[in-house]
Image: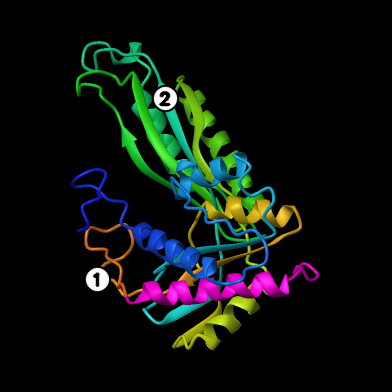
Amino acid sequence: REGFRSETGAMHACGHDGHAAIGVGVLERVQRREFQGTFKLVLQPAEEVVGGGRAVVEGGHLDDVDHLLAVHLGLDHPTGEVVAGVGGFLAVSHFEAVYEGEPAHAGAHPAQGRNAVRAMAGAIGDLYGIARHEDGATRVNVGEVHSDNATNIVAEKATMMGEVRGETTELMEYMYERASTVLEGAAATHDCEVTVGKSGEAPSAESDGALVDLVADVAREAGVDSVLDRAELGGSEDATYLMSHVQERGGLATYVGVGTDHPGGHHTATFDVDERSLPIGVDVLAGAVERIGHERPERAEREE
């Protein structure tokens, strides 16, 4: 609508233009006040599992940060509702598995071939049979399979793309290790080779109570219609890299959800942001930044 699309006919459809607008609004508000300290506005690139969160951390941009406020619009919350501490982030690892066999004519010489598609198909079924862990939620999914082989040829090559998730980073790693075993086992069963590699990853993280309380207080003082201290996301988000990095250095972090009505869910063709939610985000985040500057909240005893 504003003429700044980078690629016509394609969009991430997640509200990041709204996030940028909120960020600029917070920056302008903080500039007009007597803020004590250093304020950084980070517009994270390549959100989710592409690697933007890790790149921000590895670039050293958060090495001197003591308090982090991450923010996202929507997340199934309506306009006028704010979540002070979004949680329930599932650690995720995306993988690619490439199977290679031996081509042969499927009618004349099938025994001379080694079928990569058959190996891949066996692996897919076995992936969904991985035993779930008693320590928390785990997930596995295969979302893409591909082969360019002709129908009359025993398949020489086949590729799958999938993911594993866990309630904690350790549970995700458990699922990845088991998935790797399954993928390699299917290759051995069908006398094929497989190459397994990660194509993106994000850890789990939790919002710190001290910042959750502060943001909730600011939101209520700002007259927000509905303020939730916490809510579960149930998905994955690589802003957890930013949160974890700050927390591991002794700082505090929280992930703030600013509700927005929209005609369709995130990542759909009909997604849009209710622009009435933008000033709410500015009021809450700018107020929280100012409070942090004055109060300098510190980490309480870490919640178990």
Secondary element at tag 2: strand
Residue reaching furthest to the right: 301
Residue 297, percent across and down?
Answer: 73, 71
Q: Is residue 85 above or below residue 181?
A: below
Q: Where residue 78 is drawn, which disc sits there?
A: none
- Which quadrant, please, contains the N terminus? bottom left
The quadrant in which residue 254 appears is bottom right
For the stretch drawn in magenta, the main secondary structure is helix
Q: Amino acid at mark 1?
A: Pro
Question: Sequence-wise, which precedes: disc 2 or disc 1?
Answer: 2
Which residue is rendered at x = 37% and y = 75% of the image? 277
Which is more toward the observer, 22 or 164?
22
Closer mark to the observer between disc 2 and disc 1: 1
Question: Crowdedness of circle 2 by 10 Å Cα count: few (<14), some, many (20+)?
Answer: many
Residue 152, percent across and down?
Answer: 20, 20
For the image shown, how many numbered marks are present on the structure? 2
Which is more toward the observer, 125 or 207?
207
Question: What's the CA distance linking mark 2 and mark 1?
Answer: 41 Å
Q: Amino acid at mark 2?
A: Tyr
Q: Which residue is mark 1?
A: 263
Report the coloring of the rendering. Answer: rainbow
Extent of the magenta region = 276-304
Which residue is rendered at x = 45% and y = 46% of the image? 45
Q: Which residue is mark 2?
A: 99
- Which quadrant, please, contains the C terminus? bottom right
Residue 146, percent across and down?
Answer: 30, 32
Residue 283 in magenta? yes
Which residue is rendered at x = 53% and y = 65% of the image? 31
Label 2 with label 1: CB-CB less than 8 Å = no
Secondary element at tag 1: loop
Which residue is rendered at x = 61% and y = 71% of the image? 34
